[in-house]
Image (cartoon, rainbow, N blue to C red):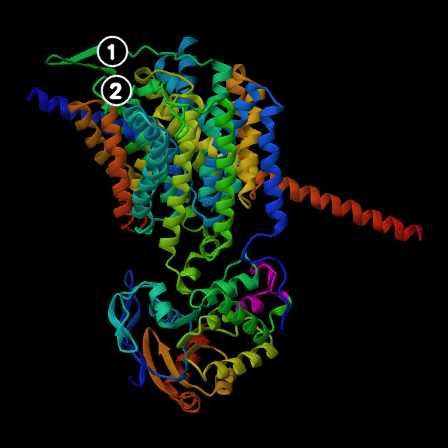
Amino acid sequence: MSEVLLEARDLEKRFGGVRAIAGVDFRLNRGELRCLIGPNGAGKSTFFKMLTAQLRPSSGRILFEGRDITALEPQRISRLGIGIKNQVPSVFDGIPVYEGLWLAAASRHPGAEAAGIVSEILERLDLGGISDHLVGTLAHGQRQWVEFGMVMALRPKLILLDEPTAGMSHDEVKRTAELIRELNREAALIVVEHDMQFIRDIAATVTVFHQGRILMEDTMANVQKDPKVREIYMGTAADA
Amino acid sequence: MAEIRGSRGGLPERRWWLAVAVVLIAALALPNLVGEYPLLQLSVVAILSLVSMSEGFLWGFVGILSFGQTAFFGLGGYTYTVAALNFDQTTLPLLAAIVLPALLALVIGYFMIYGRIGDLYLSVITLVVTLILEKAMRATSGSQYVIGSVRLNGQNGIPTVPSLAIPWSHGQTLDLTGVFYLSVVCLAIVYVALRLLLQSRTGRVFVAIRENDQRAQLLGYDSRVYKLLAFVIAGAVAGFAGALYGVWGNFVSPDMFSLSQSAQILIWVIVGGRTTLVGPIVGCALIEYLTTALGTAAVGQVTVIMGLILMFAVVFFRRGVIPSLGDGARLLWRHIQSRGARGANVSQ
Amino acid sequence: MEQTVIILYQVLYSFSFLVLICLGLAVIFGMMQVINLAQGEFIMLGAYVCNVAVKDGVSLWLSFLIAAVAVGLFGILVERVLIRFLYGRIIDTLLATWGLSIFLVGGTTIVMGPTTNSIPAPFGTMYIGAYGIPAYSLVLIALAFVLLIGTYALMRYTRAGLIARGTMQNPVMAAAFGIPPQTVYMLTFGFGSALTGLAGAIIAPLSGVSPTMGIFFIAKAFVTVIAGGPMVLLGTISASALFGSISGVVDYLTSSVLGEICVLLVAIVLLRLLPSGITGKFRRGI
């Protein structure tokens, strides 16, 4: 088996005349933990959606474990072992927390085993107290946890997290960082985040997106020192 | 470990089986208690409830709003009739009336669901399909429109639908009471089957798809297969109901495909609510009762009332008329209780 | 030669007829993303108003105008009591307006009776060779074109049209100019309804007038508008042209039921191939 888990080759996504992703080459190794940063509109979410076939690339290829997954359906990609938590929580609002987690576990595991996985996740994420609440009635932070739990229940090889700490309290953010480190023992992760402190906490390699391209790839310390990165962040700050 | 409450998946509770059995036994005792005319009415309610339930199942649990369950209902009726008249037996035609509509549902469903057509267009296409069938059937009044030895008779329909022959009974046919028993038992069987289906893994995935199709796919479920399966099941149930309807009245006509019939089905489901499988049955029974009570002299009035229900239920009772009224009553009850409790506190 | 003229006439007539029964629906759908399944009954109301007016001795042309105004006002009423609660819920709007359609059929049956009335078509019969056509149908064709051009001009060149298009694209922006979006929606729905009422009056002399007449139009109007897609006028014109040609030619060759069935079948296939209609690929416009 190759060391490279995921690879994107010259990936492009055009919306009308706009190039949301303008030629991205990206590699992720097995077991790696990577952060994507970049100003809004840099193409991070679009990139994630293409990796999970929620959007189709205009051109380019995506390889997972050496296999071309560019044209596969979302459910096939999920079954190959990529799980995603979207930026806007994509959960089942009208059913209880337990049921949502069970559906995730049961997509891979037979009934009895699935129930075991759900119990474990409820405990690990401390959702036991609200396991029979409807997901739609929960606060934003809790909905994030539920989605998190569903992704975990899939036991994926690659976990994509799009802004996992949005709307979370300080304590919750810390727990999320711990959880990510734990998950990283079994799976590779790519995390889109804006919180620099959080990124330092999980100590990941950072890929900077800017205007649909990869600007640089390095440690957080080096990225923060880089004048170009400072410029795009300051630039957007000045625009805002 | 966290305690997990409530029944989730698995088999229904014993209470539920008991309730179904009691209702079924009570229903089967009815022929001894009521006259022929009420029995005839109750039979047709049971038959139409099947269609109503097929729509409620599809709309309420899978999130597919079909405007054309009538397409399968009518096709089932005609399939049974034409086959029974041609082959001079009724058991296989009854099966054909399940298979052919299911096949039609498979074809249309594949076409729509695998084409990733949006909700609006799905509703439009199901509506158009039933309209096509209706128009085609109405156009068959000429003597050249014959299937086997059966003239389709266009507008006028076929008034010679054979009664069901009891298998291995040398040509004995089901009488009025027999049709009643058959309809009620079939309704019970389909109800129990759908309920069990909904509690199985497949049924739980249906609900997941209703809630969030995209998330279901991201979890690894091929939602198209599930939706297609549900659409075919609903089509088969509606087709079967169509055959029973033909048996019940010894008559099928293009009206079975009509727009007013499709609207009727939606009204049943809206009135009864689509959060349960029983809701559409209750809705159907209630509306049919009202229609009969208002009488045939009041055709205009009945139509006006149906229209008003459909118009305003959508605005005011989004969960269905009966469930919403139930919610309202519960709220009111709680309000009264809490006021009572406060009153008691004050008196202390 | 004679045959060519007849087929051309058939196609042109089918096209114009479709344009008439669709235009109001298309305006409402294109501008507001609302589908009025009671379109057929709005046509029926227009026809009835025209019928009553003519019976009371009003001239046919003035009756057209009265029908437009009456159904337009009725449309505003409907928008206020029903449609405005359902913006953004397109399927619920379908259900509610379906209810409205049933209600109107029932109501009209109670008030006017279930019988079919007729308005005598002026100008008698014209002959193309041995083939007789009602001369009034040429008036209908002409009026369809007038309405089409008039609607285009109204939306393209007048201030009202500009405001309406602006609001549909960005309600907040339009509100900033001091025009409440609710008012614009209400008037747009009213305008669409008026067009439909007028259409009902125009076709009444050829179609007859009965409470259930709407059912004959709704399927055609509905699929034409949906197949036309998001651009109101271009969509209506192209879908009407396509379906009009099919139904014109098939009508000429066989029976008229088959023409309609063909149209519906083509519509289904078209929706499968172009899920957002013929003009779905274009940028927004009219």
> Which badge, 2 or 1, comes first in the chain's sequence?
1
**Image spot of residue C19 (x, y percent):** 29, 31
Span colored in magenta: A130-146
From the image, tell me which residue sits under label 1: C123
Is B181 included in the stretch rendered in magenta? no
Q: Quadrant of residue A189?
A: bottom left
**Image spot of residue B108 (x, y percent):** 31, 43
User: Which residue corresponds to the image point at 37% horizontal and 18% vertical from the top-left?
Assistant: B159
Label of residue C139 in the image: 2
Label of residue B138 in the image: none
For disc 2, the neighbor class at 10 Å (few under 14, some 14 to 19, many from 20) is: few
Secondary structure under badge 1? loop
Secondary structure under badge 2? helix
Main SS, magenta region, reads helix
User: Which residue corresponds to the image point at 82% horizontal and 47% vertical from the top-left?
Assistant: B339
Is residue A235 toward the left or the right of residue C258 in the image?
right
